[in-house]
Amino acid sequence: MNIASQILDIAISKEIMIATAESCTGGMVAVALTDVAGSSAVVERGFVTYSNAAKIEMLGVSPATLATHGAVSEAVAREMAQGALAHSAAALAVSITGIAGPGGSEHKPEGRVCFGLAMAGRPTHAETQEFGAAGRAEVRRLSRDHALRLLRDALTS
């Protein structure tokens, strides 16, 4: 059984709805979940917020947070996950914002991806993964897989 199927089985058994808030992955986590038959029982919605304006308008990310920390930051990932909960009927949300490449800078290199995980009744978690300059497709794939593991771990802890 693949990880998306595991997530859905656990979420169904616990009656927990899931939302995603994605930037650099462009909806890949939502696709992975909705590729599984029966996903409509727990996948509430997905937000693809590629631009800063979308992060602000759709998820309520603070313009001040974006200005202070930049879109690729744990602070923004945290607000994205919290915003996905606030703007949905979900009880669990994962967010992703990063630099898939090509490009990046000395301060925010290619392959840096920040994740947020918000769950009703729990503190919001944020973390950064450094996938390196593995190429755009690979960074996006690694980001999707990491986000799915975060969802599974949240549901099983």
Image (cartoon, helix red, strand yellow):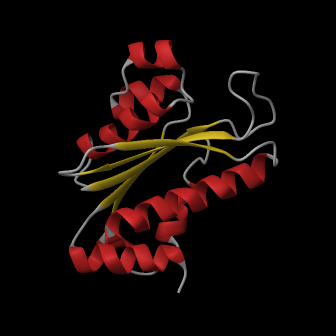
How many numbered marks appear? 0
Left or right: residue 154 versus residue 35 is left
Residue 72 position in % (x across, y down): 57, 30
Q: Nearer the viewer, residue 102 or 122?
A: 122
Q: Is residue 13 above or below residue 23?
A: below
Whether residue 30 appears in this view of the structure is no
Residue at 22% x, 53% y is: 89
Q: Residue at x 25, y 66 (%)?
A: 16
Q: Position of residue 113 (x, y in %)?
A: 61, 41
Q: Residue at x 35, y 62 (%)?
A: 154
- Asked where in the image residue 145 lies, by quadrant, the reply is bottom right
Instruction: Judge from the rendering whether residue 128 lies leftward or rightward of residue 136; answer left or right.
Output: left
Quarter of the image where the C terminus is located: bottom left
Q: Residue furthest bottom?
A: 1
Report whether 23 appears left or right of 14.
right
Please tell me in which quadrant of the rendered image residue 111 appears. Answer: top right
Q: Is residue 16 left or right of residue 2?
A: left
Q: Is residue 19 above or below residue 3?
A: above
User: Where is residue 143 shown, x and y percent of the image?
Assistant: 61, 53
The residue drawn where x is 33% and y is 77% is: 10
Residue 118, how many percent across, how many down? 32, 48
Kindly tell me whether residue 97 is visible in this rendering.
yes
**Image quarter of residue 142:** bottom right
